[in-house]
Amino acid sequence: MDPLRSKFADEDTQHQQRRSRVRPKTIAGKRLTRAEIQEGIKLADDMWYDRPKSRAECVDGPRPCPFVSCKFHLYLDVKDETKSIKLNFPHLEVWELEHTCALDVSETGGLTLEDVGHIMNLTRERVRQVEVAGINKLREAGVMTDIDRIFGGDHKFGS
């Protein structure tokens, strides 16, 4: 196959992968009925297990992680300000996820934007945007000067 055709075939494959990706689904808190909210509260009250309270308690816990309500779980995100629930993987059950804990993923070390996007069901560009926003928050908080001091100013984030 000639290089030009190969290039277009690769681009077509990437385009199909982007289009076939199942997008996250958001459930607006305002759309939940009182009965659904009460059912959720009852389920939470009836849970028989104690959720880990620290990383040390959960690091050797069962995987996939059953504690979907943990803020580090990758299955769903809860936004307090909008009272909405975002299902990151609406086409999968919790036990079908390859990765369930953001802390486990972070311990593996540096990952590419594509890898992070795959794990979190986000596009590469969205992962890049979140990374930039996080770096800007560190700058505003004055933490970047500490990072510069520790790493000698020669690191990915720049000053």
Image (cartoon, helix red, strand yellow):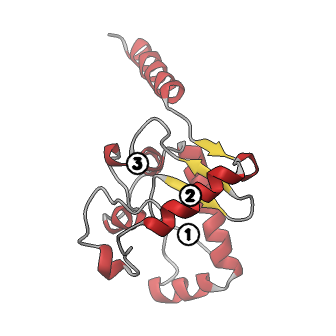
Q: Residue at x 56, y 36 (%)?
A: 23
Residue 66 screen position, x and y as percent: 35, 59
Q: Secondary structure at mark 3?
A: helix
Identify the amino acid type marked 3.
Asp
Distance between the Cα atoms at labels 1 and 3?
19 Å
Of the 4 image quadrants, the one containing the C terminus is: bottom right
Q: Secondary structure at mark 1?
A: loop
Q: Residue at x 64, y 44 (%)?
A: 26
Local crowd at mark 3 within 10 Å, few (<14), some, or many (≥20)? some
Mark toward the viewer: 1 or 3: 3
Mark toward the viewer: 3 or 2: 2
Distance between the Cα atoms at labels 3 and 2?
33 Å
Report which residue position mark 3 lands on. Answer: 115
Residue 146 screen position, x and y as percent: 55, 88
Residue 157, above or below 111: below
Report which residue position mark 1 lands on. Answer: 157
Local crowd at mark 1 within 10 Å, few (<14), some, or many (≥20)? some
Residue 50, quarter of the rendered image: bottom left
Local crowd at mark 2 within 10 Å, few (<14), some, or many (≥20)? few
Mark toward the viewer: 1 or 2: 2
Labelled pair 3, 2 in contact (Cβ < 8 Å): no
Identify the amino acid type marked 2.
Gly
Report which residue position mark 2 lands on. Answer: 40
Q: Earlier in the sequence, mark 1 or mark 2?
A: 2
Residue 6, above or below 83: above
Identify the amino acid type marked 1.
Phe
Classify residue 110 as left or right of residue 153. Answer: left
Q: Residue at x 63, y 50 (%)?
A: 36
Q: Residue at x 32, y 10 (%)?
A: 1
